[in-house]
Amino acid sequence: MEISLEQFEKALKDIRKNNSLYVKILRIGLTFIDTGISYNGLKSLLEREGYDFNNNCIELAVKQWFYDSFHHKGKDGKLVSLEDLDNHLDCGFILKGDSGLLLADHDASKMNLAVARKAMIISIIALMASILIPINDKLFSDKGETNIKPANTIIVRDTVYMEVQSIPKASDTLPKQFKPPIRINNVK
């Protein structure tokens, strides 16, 4: 079975839209936390955003999620059951606390994912720099230059004595030379 590029793009768009359906329902519920929202009110908001409630699967999924995420007490003071939901489609339902926490967890996870992606990019840049900088130094450094590094350091009464060792390049035929100690005054 072959599908056209347009059909494939439409299917991807529908998948992205349907993946965000449940989060969108929770956000709508959070928006109406002070007044409540009816199932029919929620349905009309979602229909305006392009969700097709003529599809029985979407209707059933939204009803189940609405029932699991919102609560409402009937006139008799009992909680509304899923079977009785059709008799309360115009009543105000309030977002449950657990559902609000799910939304908060979702938002925190989304933020953590964004931070982790940025950290990964920074670590890749640092890794590349740690690899490329030494290579760059070896390729483009002055060939006649000798590396100088301190061999021994002694500190005596605010005076630093360092024995500096000159490391010749492989092309140099001179033996190792030791320079006299360098005196640095008033070092604490």
Image (spheres, helix red, strand yellow):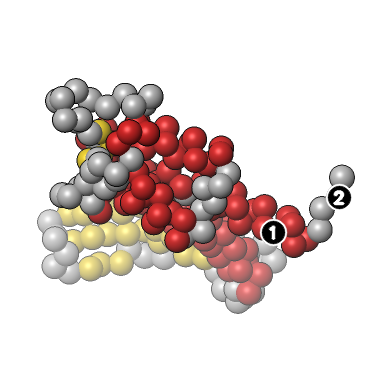
How many numbered marks, from 0 up? Answer: 2
Residue density around tag 1, few if under 14, some if 14–19, many if 20 or more, within 10 Å: few
Q: Which of the pair 121/181 is nearer the observer?
A: 121
Q: Quadrant of residue 84?
A: top left
Residue beneath disc 2: 2
Q: Are marks 2 and 1 in contact (CB under 8 Å)?
A: no
State how far apart marks 2 and 1 are (Cα). Answer: 13 Å
Labelled disc at residue 45: none
Find numbered disc 2 in the image and state the secondary structure of the residue it sits on. loop
Q: The C terminus appears in which quarter of the rendering?
A: bottom left
Residue 9 coordinates in the image, percent (x, y): 69, 59
Find numbered disc 1 in the image and state the secondary structure of the residue it sits on. helix
Q: Which of the pair 72/76 is nearer the observer?
A: 76
Three-letter code for the amino acid on which mark 1 is drawn: Glu
Residue 25 coordinates in the image, percent (x, y): 37, 47
Residue 89 coordinates in the image, percent (x, y): 33, 40
Q: The N terminus appears in which quarter of the rendering?
A: top right
Three-letter code for the amino acid on which mark 2 is drawn: Glu
Residue beneath disc 1: 9
